[in-house]
Image: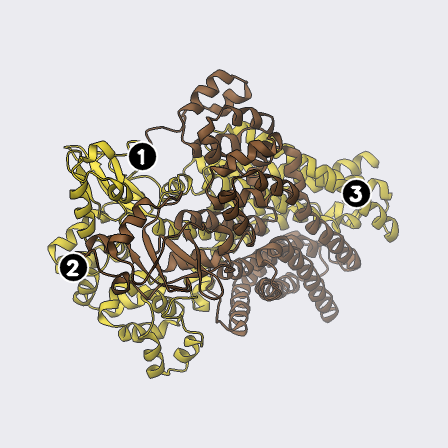
Chain colours: A brown, B yellow
Amino acid sequence: MMPHRQPPEIDVLDLIDDEEWPQVASILADLHPADIAEIINRASSDAHEKLFAMVLTDLKADVLSELKGIAGEDILESLSELEISTIVQDMAPDDAADMLADLPDERSEQILDLMKKEDSEDVRELLKYEEDTAGGIMTPDVVAMKENQTVAEAIHEIAYFETDEPLYNVNVVDHGDVLTGFVDIWELLRERDKGRPLRDLAERDFVAATVDMDQEEVAHLLSKYHLTAIPVVDNIGTLVGRVTADDVIDVIEEEASEDIFRLAGSDDIELEQSSIFRTCLVRLPWLFITLFGGFITSAVMSRYQASISEIIILAAFVPVVMAMGGNTGIQSSTLIVRSIALGSLKGRSVARILLKEIMVGALMGLACSAIIGIWAHIFSGMSKTSTFTPFQISTVVAVAMFCAMTFAATAGALVPIVLNRLRIDAAVASGPFVTIMNDITALLIYFAVTVTFVNAFA
Amino acid sequence: MMPHRQPPEIDVLDLIDDEEWPQVASILADLHPADIAEIINRASSDAHEKLFAMVLTDLKADVLSELKGIAGEDILESLSELEISTIVQDMAPDDAADMLADLPDERSEQILDLMKKEDSEDVRELLKYEEDTAGGIMTPDVVAMKENQTVAEAIHEIAYFETDEPLYNVNVVDHGDVLTGFVDIWELLRERDKGRPLRDLAERDFVAATVDMDQEEVAHLLSKYHLTAIPVVDNIGTLVGRVTADDVIDVIEEEASEDIFRLAGSDDIELEQSSIFRTCLVRLPWLFITLFGGFITSAVMSRYQASISEIIILAAFVPVVMAMGGNTGIQSSTLIVRSIALGSLKGRSVARILLKEIMVGALMGLACSAIIGIWAHIFSGMSKTSTFTPFQISTVVAVAMFCAMTFAATAGALVPIVLNRLRIDAAVASGPFVTIMNDITALLIYFAVTVTFVNAFA
């Protein structure tokens, strides 16, 4: 059973492309704001303004807070500051802050000035925090009560508290608003003596996030301790907001997308892109890393021209040695990048991790080089064009692959560790960067081994 | 501010390695079960049994439900069926079912028989569902009330309901237990007439998951509609359980890890692996895909030996054409795999997506082949060993790269789409499979272009 207002089965996007506006409008009228936003997000750029104009006035705030990337930009561009300010006033303060943070400072200032003071104050407060921290994703709507207030007061407060996010507990604070504990809503209900002070019921063993905590870390705390919301405190412990689980779900999906795209050599803003040209602009910079590496690989290959032309069969194994090096390196870097993202690398000694990756690379290198050695032996036996024996050729290929794989595993682990230490997002440079580095190294190793053996056999 | 029972700053893992058991025990005694589980998960295999034995009896259930992979296996192996049954009895039914599902049928049957009937019934019910569906991750603990019951009755029910998961609303059902709506806890509190029937307050416009819905889809519903929990119904609409946001966070992290590792050609069970040998066993099968592809690339290279030895400079550009093909293909397949995972591909015409990827590949191919063409021109001008003019060489390289990149973008998009249609997890085969396919194709294209031009120029 799905929501009673079902997302449309027929393809609204086709109706939009065909400019069947009356039909589109009647479909949108029945939808949940999240479904409307999804349709606008996926529609092509020229339909964005028109579609948003169809949204009922009291849904505009909800729809706008769900719009992403280009759809959001298009619509904010098409609206006046006054129009935006009336919509933003109806948004949850955290959504409003997220949206205004993406606008030029001057414009967001104008919009804030046009808003009611009580609404704009909350938003201004949130805009102070970095977007990807607890402060940046929290809502400032919290119920804070003193230790000596009663259960009855707390129940009343929670029942009549105005917020856009569900609220399931009261936070207990001391006289300086420092968070000292919390009481769950059902503890309040279960308490027979409604005149009891919160002091007696408060759970003191709580988890809180600090305003400047990275959003990924906030997500881990929620997931690890199975929380539906986490209070946010400033550096001296004063309660300033809370982050709810549904916001964290968005954070995790975004961060995972980001890591996935970075490993592949791309950018997750692609997920919201629709034009071919813009997609190219997002992907090309990453390809240029590979292309630049290509300048080097061609130079390396060319440097060893003499060896290649002498033992032409050896050129046949260049692609497999490179591919195996590349794949091994990405396996290692992926493990490290993901372990960093999930926080499971903390407190581990770098030397131990590196040693393990080297051992793994070497062990797999042994297995794979044995297989490719046998293949090279059979294969070069068949082709018989070489001045070298099949045994010599298979030795060169096997040794080169073993060295390339061991090195690739080491480099694949080392690069993200180093980047993380330098406080650069490890996922950024791990994919294409590690691959091209391993390509170049695999080639150098291959030819170094070749030259060494050619001299030895000669 | 962190939890009052702080996770240990000093490296417990080192203490465990050094077998400083009394110190380890005193640290564990102060920790949250989630922190204890994290330490056991990360400790080496031979310490698992010892560490779990140190856990206080009433925390054993909580700790065991958080253990993953090898740590969980080790401890379940070390315990008798009777010991497990007493621990499992204290677990949330969904955690118990998850754990028993991983055991051999016979053993989990023995454990269930040893449990109290009332506990085992819930677990047996949950074991019927596939692990990665709404049924598999839900808890059966729900508050269901009839339409004519009152607000006061609902408040009482919710306050005294025994559950391991937070509970924030009552579900309203008809006489056949079919879900008809829900009432939020604070609606109940705000209602002044506590004798009012729930019928008058129920929100009818709700979202529900069906038992057999994929867990990723459940996660999307929660995230899209900003829910902290979602009711689960069977195929005729009867309420059977609910999924809470914290469970969904785990699901999203797991699914993202899975996709990331598959793209890299590995497996996310690696995240829990500690031994070098086991890590190799996980990674090697993926490398064999690449290795097998290497048999083909070497055969292709060898087939074109004559051309290579004739125009040796052309061999220098084999690596860059292959690398660019590989990277372009992974960019396309990543976009498709992630779009499938996030559900944003639904209702889109496959032809439109493919056409876009082809256009993007061709456009980027144009840009990159222009650059590599210029480089090849300069480079082959410098080396002067070729019988062909720099113009001819740069034409061959540029045309080959353009074709390879356009093909790679197409194949990169097509493979995951086809796999998805065949109901195979698209992420499984996209990484190494797409890369090696593009390697082989890039080579074939490269030599086809070479031969064509060599004949034309000759």
Q: Position of residue A136 (x, y in %)?
A: 51, 52
At horizontal 56% and vertical 36% (from top left) the residue drawn is A72
Q: Which residue is mark 1?
A: B206
Point out the tag, 3 or 1, that comes first from the N-terminus. Answer: 1
At horizontal 34% and vertical 66% (from top left) the residue drawn is B37
Q: Is residue B67 above or below residue A125?
A: below
The chain letter for the residue carrying disc 2 is B
Q: Position of residue B421 (x, y in %)?
A: 44, 34
Report the amino acid beneath label 1.
Answer: Phe
Nearer the camera: disc 3 or disc 1:
1
Depth check: give the residue in front, B143 or A152: A152
Point out the tag, 2 or 3, that comes first from the N-terminus. Answer: 2
Does any portion of residue B457 appear in the rendered image? yes
Q: On the image, which quarter does residue A148 sit in?
A: bottom left
Residue at the farthest left position? B117
At horizontal 72% and vertical 69% (from top left) the residue drawn is A452
The residues tagged by marks 2 and 3 sit, at their Cα atoms, a distance apart of 70 Å
Query: Which numbered disc covers residue B110?
Result: 2
